[in-house]
Image: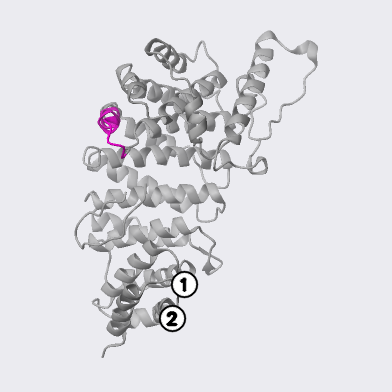
Amino acid sequence: MVRSIIKTEGKDPNYGSTRTVRRTSKSTLSPEYKKHIKEGKELNKRAEQMRQRSSSTLSDDDIRDDISSNNPKCVPEIVHVSDLAVSKKSMDDIKLPTPVKLSKELCRIVDLNRYTHVESVLTLEKLFDWAETKDPDYLRYFDRYSGVVKVLDFLEQIMKDSTCKGAIRMECIGKAALVIKSVCSSVEDGSNNNDVASKIASTLIECEGIDTLIDASREYTGGDNISQIWAVQSVLGALSNIILLKDHAIGKEKAVALFNTGVDIISQLKFVDGPVASRVLEHVFHTLSTIVENDYMTKQYFQYKKTLSESLDVFTKDDTWSNRTEKVADEAIYFFNICRIKDLLDEGSDYEVLLPFFAMGLKKFPSNKLIRTNTVKFLYHTCTTVNGRKHLEKAGAMESLSLLLTSDDISEEEKKTVRKVIVKIVAP
């Protein structure tokens, strides 16, 4: 969902692998073990097909071998994909289930005594593919048969299952979250899908699904374990969609718990680079912005969590600005602006530490209109704070603004706004 430029002060803006299996003597393989190996081959074939039609797939080199060789149920490792988005052509090829077929598939994921983790993942992939078609009848059937409750039940069972470890555990969590993310997504096609998605999200909230997803996000224990990072990205995507649909329904207690989890994840990712880590940070800043926009955050708690210092640390490495993506910078700049509008910042120290980041963003991504506009608004407001102009000069804001005036890619109207900010800074 694309965020808009902040236009009105005080008003909420609309934005909105390679598989590694230890070789075993053929004579020692039990029928059950052979079944798992066969399932693993089928799953890798399925995952390879999804990789080919995914627009944002992780390379095989990115995948960690995190298999527990002592647990046959977890032997077949799954090829990870960072996003299960598929092309329009692929969507047209998907055959949607009958209501009875959907009901049977949903029962498969909650009966872990009968079905293996691998079979559950295959079922989740089907549910995701069907949900991504945004077919109104499918979404109604999913709601009718309590699909989101069954996915939550599966997620809770997996997190309590000590035999499910490593990559397969993260795959189960991540793909369950992707199903929730898809059925709780809003669309702008004039259909009634948003009503159904909102109803599904309400059911999830009533069943303590926010708590379950927050617990799932804590499966990430820090570091560069790609399986864990991918899973937490999917979980945060689901949480973001739910909050966008039901922003006033989650309650302050859960909103604060989610804010706390988001800041903790940012802290854990400060030394982790890579595209998947960046996607996680995008979701975190997006979610934190939504929480702040809806007045769930107090200045006291915001300051207590050291939110600014933790957030800015992910953009620095060895006292220099790290190579985070443009989208991460955009989401962070939006978040800091919302914090300013909601009066969560201390006008002295907080502005002083934020301004170098804004100046860096303007220099590094001058072609991004959202970054330009939201940064210029922040700089303009800074001029009205105590020692604001002094902090602006020290942060190098004048240099960043001057570069915009020499750009051929910026309209004359926008340059007029930039000149006003410069005049405001240098005015006696």
Relative horizontal placement of residue 416, taking residue 44 as reference (left or right): left
Residue 350: image location, x then y, percent: 33, 68
- Numbered circle sitting on residue 363: 1
Question: Tag 2, which secondary structure?
Answer: helix
- 415 and 216: which is toward the camera: 415
Relative horizontal placement of residue 257, taking residue 227 as reference (left or right): left
Instruction: Please give the name of the residue rendered at 27% of the width and 63% of the height, measured from the top-left corner.
Output: 340
Residue indicated by mark 2: 399
Residue 41: image location, x then y, percent: 67, 22
* Amino acid type of the residue tagged 2 in the rendering: Glu
The local crowd at label 2, few if under 14, some if 14 to 19, many if 20 or more residues have their Cα within 10 Å, is some
Question: Tag 1, which secondary structure?
Answer: helix
The local crowd at label 1, few if under 14, some if 14 to 19, many if 20 or more residues have their Cα within 10 Å, is some
Relative horizontal placement of residue 63, taking residue 213 as reference (left or right): right
Question: Which quadrant would residue 71 be assigned to in this image?
Answer: top right
From this viewpoint, which residue is outermost toward the bottom?
428
Which portion, as a residue range, is magenta? 188-201
- 404 and 231: which is toward the camera: 404
Labelled pair 1, 2 in contact (Cβ < 8 Å):
yes
Task: Residue 194: say if magenta.
Answer: yes
The coloring applied to the image is one colour
Instruction: Please give the name of the residue rendered at 23% of the width and 49% of the height, measured from the top-left corner.
Output: 294
- 273 and 257: which is toward the camera: 273
